[in-house]
Image (cartoon, rainbow, N blue to C red):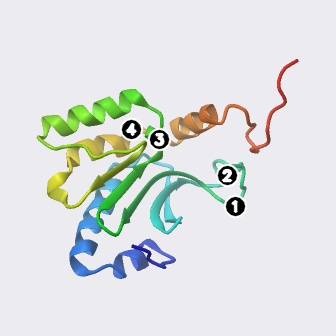
Amino acid sequence: MKIEARTPAGYLAALPAERRKTLAEIRSLVRKHLPAGYVETMQYGMISYVVPLKRYAAGYLGRKDVPLPCIAIAAQKYHYAIYLMGFYGDAAAEREMKRRFAVDGKRLDMGKCCVRFKSLDEVSLGALEWAVGKVSVDAMIARYEEARGDRDRAGKRRRPAR
C-alpha cells in the first residue's frame, strides 16, 4: 500500500478508518516505549524512528542526509508491519521474540527484522513493547557500525591492514 505522505499524521490520515486505528495504536505503543534520543519522521514511505543526523552525522549507508533508521511502521497491502532494524542479525533477540509471542499464545511472523500481522489480535503487544524499548540510540549505532565493520563513521571503506 503506497502512501504519499510527508508527515506521520499525514500517513495516518491517508489510511481507511480501521487501518488508521490499528496503525495509530502501534504508533502509540512505539512512542511510549521507544528509548530517548530517537526522532519520529517519514522515511522510505513509512512512519520511522531514526537516530538524528546531529547524533550520527555519518548517516545511513554513508549518506549524510539520511538518518540511521531503527524502527518503522507501515500499513502494507495485506498486513501491518513493524520493522525492528536493531534486531537484524540478532538471533538471541529473535528467539526471545518467539518466546514472548508463544507465552502470549501468538504465532510470530517475522523476517530478518520485520514483524508482520493482519490485526492487533495476532500480535503480542507485550513482545513489541519489549522489542521497541530494547535498543538505545547508542546500541543502535554500535550494532550498525559493527554490521558495517569495513567502513568508517563517514561510510567510507577502510583499507585492509597490511
Neighbourhood count class around disc 2 (C-alpha, 10 Å): few under 14, some 14–19, many 20 upward: many
Q: Is residue 156 left or right of residue 120?
A: right
- Label located before the other in sequence (1 or 4): 1
What residue is shown at x 21% (from left), y 35% (from top)? 100
State the residue position of label 1.
65
Tell me where residue 145 appears, x and y as whole percent: 63, 36
Tell me where residue 33 appears, x and y as whole percent: 33, 49
- Label located before the other in sequence (2 or 3): 2
Where 159 falls versus 105 (above or below)?
above
Determine the secondary structure under disc 3.
Answer: helix
What residue is shown at x 45% (from left), y 48% (from top)? 36
Q: Is residue 104 left or right of residue 146?
A: left
Separation of marks 1 and 2 at Cα, in angstroms:
6 Å
Q: Amino acid at mark 3?
A: Gly
State the residue position of label 3.
86
Determine the secondary structure under disc 2.
Answer: loop
Q: Nearer the viewer, residue 159 or 11?
A: 159
User: Are the residues tagged 1 and 2 within 8 Å (C-beta)?
Assistant: yes
User: Are the residues tagged 1 and 4 within 8 Å (C-beta)?
Assistant: no
